[in-house]
Image (cartoon, helix red, strand yellow):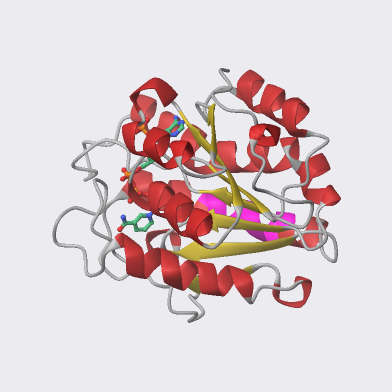
Amino acid sequence: MQKVKLMNQSSSTSESTLTVLVTGANRGLGLEFCRQYVAAGYRVIATCRQPQKATELTELSERSSLAIMALDVTDSQAINRLGEQLQDQPIDILLNNAGIYGSQGQVIGNCHAEPWLNTFLVNSVAPMLITTALLPSLKLAKQPKVGFVTSKMGSIADNTSGGSYIYRSSKAALNAVIKSLAIDFADVVSMVALHPGWVRTDMGGPNGLIDVEESIAGMRKVIDNLSTADSGQFIDYKGVTVPW
Ligand code: NAP
């Protein structure tokens, strides 16, 4: 794991500055989370697989207190190292954002074990491992919050069109993880399952209904309003509850 810029190298941040850590921060929703939290005055730790190729993040880091750290979320040793490296620094908001759709054409007869299991690793297993590895940092914050970027496609109740077996099942599994974490850490860390909307990103494609700016602004508002009392909910970027 390569640390590109240390958090304490910035002179423009103070003790009271809140810290947010974002996974999958180099493009799409993750990059926009970073842009908006930087603009709002947060200290941002942006993690991504290949910092040397993260041109937009690097530009952002050059004019802000954003620090880039390498993290492939499928690497459990790297996750543990990240937790150890940050254990003395409070993290106020953790955003488990990195995700994949899995293979294309997830129809009957075309869902294979290898891409399916890899999708589970990225979408369902990694957010749990990252959250537990970062618990010492979360516990140092005054009002720690974890936002899990899941999807309405992981909702069993909302599934009226079938298909997308790999993606749907991986996000449904993530939803079960979020619910248990919210129960196990009630009154300690607030957890929220976030549906970003159908967003125009590489994953969402050009026909998405909203742009990243609108999605992230909405999810930030949901996170701002989150308290331990409403931990464990499934909420979309408009603040509307999504059925499980
Ligand atoms: P995206 O544009 O495809 O970006 C995905 C991000 O995840 C990239 O930064 C990617 O990094 C990262 N990532 C993938 N595998 C990783 C790994 N093993 N380790 C670290 N990072 C990894 O997708 P997006 O639309 O921004 O999606 C972000 C989240 O929103 C995902 O969890 C997705 O399921 C969820 N979501 C999106 C939509 C939508 O309409 N866009 C709707 C519902 C939910 P690389 O560049 O290295 O691949």
Q: Where 24 sits versus 236, above or below?
A: above
Whether residue 162 is visible to the viewer of this picture, yes or no, is: yes
Work out which residue is located at the far front of the displayed protein and give it. 11
Query: In the figure, 16 relative to 135: above or below?
Result: below
Q: Quadrant of residue 109?
A: top left
Report the predominant secondary structure element of the magenta stretch. helix
Residue 178 located within the stretch drawn in magenta: yes
Q: Position of residue 185 (x, y in %)?
A: 81, 57
Residue 168 in the image: state x and y as whole percent. 39, 53
Is residue 200 shown left or right of residue 167?
left
Q: Is residue 27 above or below residue 218?
A: above
Relative to residue 51, is residue 8 drawn left or right? right
Residue drawn at the location 18% of the way across and 42% of the way down: 105
The quarter of the rendered structure image containing the N terminus is top right
Q: At 48% across and 75% down in the image, what residue appears?
A: 242
32 to 23, vertically: above or below? below
Residue 149 appears in the figure? no
Does the magenta-highlighted stretch encompass residue 93? no
Q: Depth check: give the residue in front, 155 or 233.
A: 233
Tell me which residue sits at (47%, 56%) in the image: 150
- Foreground residue, 57 or 129? 57
Query: Which one is nearer the viewer's eye here, 125 or 114?
Result: 125
Q: How many marks?
A: 0
Residue 221, percent across and down? 53, 74
* 121 on left or right of 179: left
x and y, in percent, of residue 15 in the image: 79, 51
Where is ligand 1, by quadrant? top left
Q: Which residues are magenta?
A: 173-181
Extreme residue in the bottom direction: 240
